[in-house]
């Protein structure tokens, strides 16, 4: 079974000998087994790690097999023999040789994915962050609010400092309808209201509709009175040349029609007041 060797970038210096924190992995062994590892230093002809299952971790592949991993401090210039065995019956075993100088130190030129570094005396000037000893995550910026303060944009008078930007200059959330209206002022147009019912026109609004001229100078209110007189009011003068139509009160003449001998109207006057 092939053993997968992965070397971490961290380097340990112990008693003057370079050692690399190394992950050795035995893959292909059955899953859910108690697996032991033994590490034999071929260069020193010594057993560095006796058979042990302590700190051996498992990652299953979902197909009945697993990779078993173990972290060890191995000297960078030594050769090793890695042995594995599980508690199956019969026992499954695996072994591999790590040749000399396979494990090597790693020099990191640029590291962009780690946190927790300390910057000493950053020598930042006015208009920048200053006196920052440690920024290890986004929340750490809150620790330097006092340092940021007036230092940002102090180079030119055209930019305000942070202390000049106060909450009172921002539009606060309005929860009172009257406050919202007074803040917005006039000129607010509501195009569609979908969640309200029960609206009604005021008497002023109704009067404005009925008093709008619809035929010449006659309004809807006047035409209603004239039509009711012709359709439902009393009349007089039938058979003569003048026919009168009274309003529903029986006294007000709403329509005066002049007719010829055939009953054709030759003149009409109306009164809608």
Image: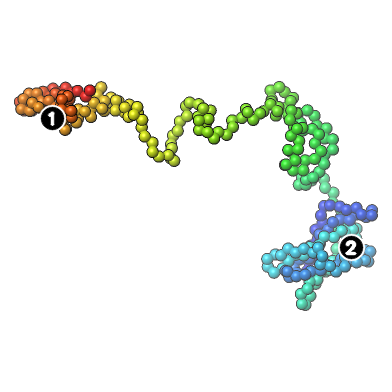
Residue 45: which disc?
none
Give the mark, 2 or 1, whose residue is nearer the N terminus.
Answer: 2
Q: Quadrant of the N terminus?
A: bottom right
In the image, residue 121 sits, relative to residue 159, either above or below, namely below
- Front residue of 232/240: it is 232
* Residue at the farthest bottom position: 90
Above or below, comparing residue 75 to residue 221 in the picture: below
Q: Local crowd at mark 1 within 10 Å, few (<14), some, or many (≥20)? A: some
Residue beneath label 1, please? 234
Residue 239: x percent and y percent? 5, 27
Q: Can you tell which of label 2 and label 1 is closer to the viewer?
A: 1
Q: Residues within 10 Å of mark 2 (few under 14, many from 20)?
A: many
Q: Is residue 94 visible?
A: no
Q: Residue 198 vs residue 124: left or right?
A: left
Q: Residue at x 77, y 70 (%)?
A: 34
Q: Position of residue 138 (x, y in %)?
A: 72, 42
Left or right: residue 10 versus residue 256 is: right
Residue 244 position in % (x across, y down): 12, 25
Q: Give the residue at x 16% y 33%.
A: 232
Gap between marks 2 and 1 measured at Cα:
126 Å
Does residue 71 appear to the left or right of 180 in the view shown? Answer: right
Q: How is the image coloured?
A: rainbow
Q: Quadrant of residue 258?
A: top left
Quarter that holds the C terminus: top left
Look at 77% across and 43% down and name the residue there: 136
Residue for badge 2: 79
Q: Position of residue 121 (x, y in %)?
A: 84, 35
Q: Nearer the viewer, residue 263 or 38?
A: 263
- Left or right: residue 48 versus residue 189 is right
């Amino acid at each position: 079974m092939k053993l997968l060797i992965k070397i971490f970038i961290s380097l340990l210096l112990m008693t003057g000998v370079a050692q690399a924190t190394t992950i050795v992995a035995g893959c292909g062994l059955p899953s859910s087994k108690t697996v032991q590892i033994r590490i034999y230093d071929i260069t020193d002809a010594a057993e560095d790690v006796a058979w042990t299952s302590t700190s051996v971790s498992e990652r299953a592949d979902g197909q009945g097999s697993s990779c078993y991993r173990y972290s060890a401090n191995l000297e960078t210039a030594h050769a090793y023999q890695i042995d594995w065995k599980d508690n199956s019956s019969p026992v499954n075993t695996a072994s591999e040789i790590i040749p000399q100088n396979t494990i090597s130190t790693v020099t990191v030129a640029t590291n962009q994915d780690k946190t927790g570094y300390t910057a000493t005396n950053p020598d930042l000037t006015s208009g920048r962050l200053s006196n920052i000893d440690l920024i290890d995550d986004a929340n750490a910026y809150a620790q330097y609010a006092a340092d940021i303060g007036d230092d940002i944009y102090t180079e030119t008078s055209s930019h305000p400092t942070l202390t000049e930007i106060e909450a009172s200059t921002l539009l606060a959330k309005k929860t009172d309808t009257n406050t919202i209206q007074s803040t917005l002022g006039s000129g607010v147009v509501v195009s569609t209201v979908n969640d309200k019912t029960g609206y009604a026109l005021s008497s002023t609004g109704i009067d404005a509709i009925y008093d709008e001229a619809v035929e010449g100078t006659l309004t809807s209110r006047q035409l209603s009175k004239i039509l009711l007189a012709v359709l439902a009011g009393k009349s007089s003068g039938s058979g003569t040349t003048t026919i009168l139509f009274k309003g529903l009160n029986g006294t007000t003449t709403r329509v005066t029609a002049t007719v010829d001998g055939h009953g054709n109207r030759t003149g009409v006057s109306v009164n809608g007041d």
